[in-house]
Amino acid sequence: MEWTKHLLVVPILLPLATGAALLLIDELRHTAKALVSLASTVLLLVVAIALMRMADAGGPGALSSSYAVANWPAPFAIVLVLDRLSALMLAVTAVLGLAALVFSMARWHRAGPHFHSLFQFLLMGLGGAFLTGDVFNLFVFFEVTLAASYGLLLHGTGAFRVRSGLHYISINLAASLLFLVGVSLIYGVAGTLNMADLALRMAQVPAEDRMLVQAGAAILGVAFLVKAGMWPLGFWLPPAYMAAAAPVGAIFVLLTKVGIYVLLRLTLLFFGSEAGELTGFGGIALLWGGLATLAFATSGVLASQALGRLAGYSVLVSSGTLLAAVGMGDAAVVSGALFYLVSSTFGTAALFMLTELVERAREPGADLLAVTIEAYGEDGEEPGEHEDEEVGVTMPGALAVLGVCFGCTTLLLAGLPPLSGFIGKFAMLTGMLNLDGLGSTGDIPARTWLLLALVILSGLAALVAMMRTGIRTFWAPLETIVPRVLVVEIAPIVALLALCLLLTVEGGAVIGYTDAAARSLHDPLSYIHGVLGTADAGSGTK
């Protein structure tokens, strides 16, 4: 239908208009602001699903559509590009945004001014970053996302939140400066910032200028590696995400995926199949950086006593796994990585929201006290002294629901069956061990075995750490406290876990989608021809 071509601008214009309108509503009218924000986010989810169906309607390697704003011809226009990868990221953004927003309506949206406006501006920046076909506008949307995230991270009170927020702001401002420097170097040499046009001009850059282009691309890559949390650039992430309010931490899980998305998109688009062979630009750095991040995050997961810090390191586990998979450069590995991206994003976001509810069932300082008891024991207590008192004790309903959700989240993060975390890891590992096709008998490089071992060990570490926390909270708490849990708080968590179960049930269809997305990424000519080869400036679509 003719009107559907304009859907590409909705993920940007809808949250922008909603956020601006919410600024005009008095801050005391919390219910009105919440309903407007909720309606907008639901509509965004509907549009994201429609765009995902549009993206999947084309051929295996075809670009779904692009939209030239103001009908200027490419490459001069501000171009929005829709393909399977961008549509997938938009859908994940809308789902996670709706879940975090519903959770916030219990209390967090009233904890400070302009929460809903900042939240909508964050959704706008994410939607623009995933749809833009221009590196400069990627910078603009990147800054919109960061500006909104600064306010959201500081939403609420507490010295720890302010201190972590200031660290977060300073690190990301430095990353923004690197981004601008990298963009300037690329534009100074290539003379364009349209991604498709840049992909064509990269091969035409004179030999004496090629080092400047690669330096610009490397600086640009560092900026997004900071956002993705690659070691040693991600030291700021666990404390910052731990300090954020629960719904903010949940949506922040997606911010690290922006860095992964851009690295995956631009590396394969600008440097083509060279990156896939791990001998071209950036492939080795991403692989070994991902391995180092995965090792660092695994040790952090094991060392974490607080559940919020464990969730922060789980974000780094996901980032390290995805960076290493991108560095592998194989389409089958990337396909499994995209499946894992969706599953780990939902699982980690659910853990951030679940953390707040679980902490209500524990006394302040329970983690420190539990560690002390484990190390030194309880003086004067004989073995079996209280065992009879515990027999037949019934777990309250709220704790039972939280316990089931906690167990499902543990399965997701550990990558154990039957949930989707297992399918994502299995798909990645299958691709790693069959780089020349399923059933190949070629030699497997040592770095592949190392990645395989770290992926498995990270799952084991998550299982150990989550079981340790679960035992302290649900099985053998120092004192049983029945938390007050509202429906709007538990419903988004259950919904995210249900979606992960749906990913398991529909695993074949989802893997088919991610396979097509990965093949399209490894065929940059389809993207280039889709944006530049069939331009139709008069209609605004190509």
Image (cartoon, rainbow, N blue to C red):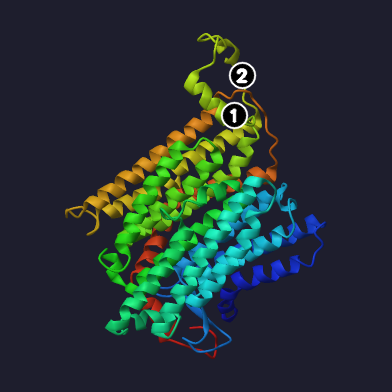
Q: Residue 35's quadrant in the figure?
A: bottom right
Q: Residues within 10 Å of mark 1 (few under 14, many from 20)?
A: some
Looking at the rendered structure, the secondary structure element under dot 2 is: loop
Which label's residue is closer to the chain start, 2 or 1?
A: 1
Residue 495 sits above or below residue 468 on the image:
below
Image coordinates for residue 461, horizontal then vertical, percent: 41, 38
Q: Are marks 2 and 1 in contact (CB under 8 Å)?
A: no
Image coordinates for residue 373, horizontal then vertical, percent: 52, 21
Residue 109 sits above or below residue 477 on the image:
below
Image coordinates for residue 321, horizontal then vertical, percent: 38, 52
- Is residue 525 shown left or right of residue 148? left
- Is residue 231 shown left or right of residue 275? right
- Is residue 211 shown left or right of residue 479? left
Looking at the rendered structure, the secondary structure element under dot 1 is: helix
Going by the numbered disc 1, the residue's amino acid type is Ala
Residue wearing tag 1: 366
Which residue is painted at 73% across and 47% down in the image? 107
State the residue lying farthest toward the bottom: 538
Residue 247, can we see it?
no
Determine which of the numbered discs, if any, sits on residue 422 in the image: none
Image coordinates for residue 1, horizontal then vertical, percent: 56, 79
Determine which of the numbered discs, if any, sits on residue 393 in the image: 2
Going by the numbered disc 2, the residue's amino acid type is Val
Q: Nearer the viewer, mark 2 or mark 1?
A: 1
Which residue is painted at 73% across and 54% down in the image? 112
Q: Residue 43's quadrant in the figure?
A: bottom right
